[in-house]
Amino acid sequence: MELSATGRAILGMLSIEPKSGYDIKTLADKSARFFWAASYGQIYPELKRLAAAGLAEASEPKGERKRTVYRITPSGKKAVRDWIVATEMTHELRDEGLLKLFFAGALGRDEAEAVVRAKRAAHQAALDELRDIEPFAAQAERFGPHAVLRYGLEFNEFAIRWCDHILNELEN
Amino acid sequence: MELSATGRAILGMLSIEPKSGYDIKTLADKSARFFWAASYGQIYPELKRLAAAGLAEASEPKGERKRTVYRITPSGKKAVRDWIVATEMTHELRDEGLLKLFFAGALGRDEAEAVVRAKRAAHQAALDELRDIEPFAAQAERFGPHAVLRYGLEFNEFAIRWCDHILNELEN
DNA sequence: CGATTCATGTAACTTGTTACATGATTAG
DNA sequence: CTAATCATGTAACAAGTTACATGAATCG
């Protein structure tokens, strides 16, 4: 029973501390959305699969709000460690702005400029969003979350600089 | 009949010049793979859909090797232009290295270091590959392909610098 | 003449999104 | 009291990958 990339991501979330499906979705949206997204349609079925595989255990739903909290098992911890130390890592990018720019030269300078301006605006919006959550990540005790957030900030800064450079070139 | 993102990408390829499904796959692999991938399983059915929608026309298979070449129609050209000037553009990233780093802090310094080193190596390999195709793109008459290739080069250079910086921090 | 490239396609599968259904609790 | 948030799930759909099948042409 091979664990999918999403299964590993969810198990990773549980390796921090026990969580419900709702918690996982909230954390993913708040901290990892820019490089890893997940929907409820994946999370809830996947949690059941992890439990069936013995990598996590579900608590009985309890509390005023009956939530099912999943806790990682020793064999789940081993799976997370094995995954993290393996050197394979996928990197997939789907950037519609670059795709448009690829073709925009065939239209004209104005069109290419509009594409780059729109791309710049998208990166600026992403940057603003990440800056809003930075204080929250800066006080985290663990190294990872803050490091990846800084990656997000610096990447968007890079992309904005690149757009400015291209706009400059387009104006000759 | 809404055009999918993949449909738009393929129509964009046809806007440069008429192409077969095989041509589209080759071009996509050579020039756009790092920000937009497509498989035969998508390309061939999508070409038929584009033809059915009147956005492209299929030539009769001919030549020594019988290939079916698709040519964009006027209404296809309009669709490409409308798409390019629209400001919406998706940006999706799936970076398993960042995901690993996010969790690696809970394991230890050595594990985090190994993750960053592996991520660095992946970006270096991507950079080498892009450098191999740079001469090919540099002589293109259109602006787009060379611009996006430079984005690929500069992005990977940024990522390598970032990894080096993090490795430095991890060594305190 | 054998390996590689050209060339087209489909079927089965995996993955992921969206929309919907349901209902409790809490904040204003 | 009512809107927002907490909380879990599924069904239908859309998107994308992989593996397979087939065969001609070209290169060394």
Image (tube, coloured by chain):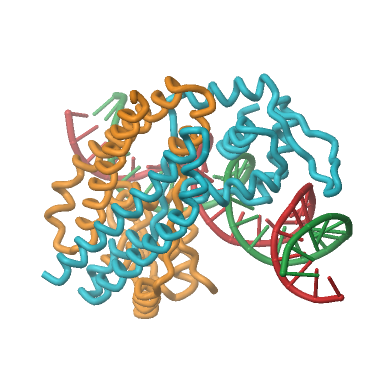
Chain colours: A orange, B cyan, C red, D green
Is A32 displayed left or right of A137 in the figure?
right
Is B2 displayed left or right of B150 in the figure?
right
Q: Quadrant of the N terminus of chain B?
A: top right
Is B45 displayed left or right of A128 in the figure?
right
Which residue appears at 23% of the width and 62% of the height?
A144
Is B122 displayed left or right of A147 in the figure?
right
Question: Residue A151, relative to residue B106: is it above or below?
Answer: above
B138 or B110: nearer the eye? B138
Residue B24 is at least partly visible in this image: yes
Which residue appears at 62% of the width and 38% of the height?
B10
Q: Quadrant of residue A166?
A: top left
Q: Quadrant of the C terminus of chain B?
A: bottom left
Residue A73 is at least partly visible in this image: no
Which residue appears at 76% of the width and 29% of the height?
B57
Q: Quadrant of residue B87?
A: top left
**Residue B41 place in picture, x, y as percent:** 68, 50
**Residue A29 place in picture, x, y as percent:** 33, 47
D16 or A1: nearer the eye? D16
Which residue appears at 42% of the width and 63% of the height?
B125
Question: Residue B14, relative to residue A141: is it above or below?
Answer: above
Q: Quadrant of residue A89?
A: bottom left
**Residue D15 place in picture, x, y as percent:** 58, 44
B138 or A150: nearer the eye? B138
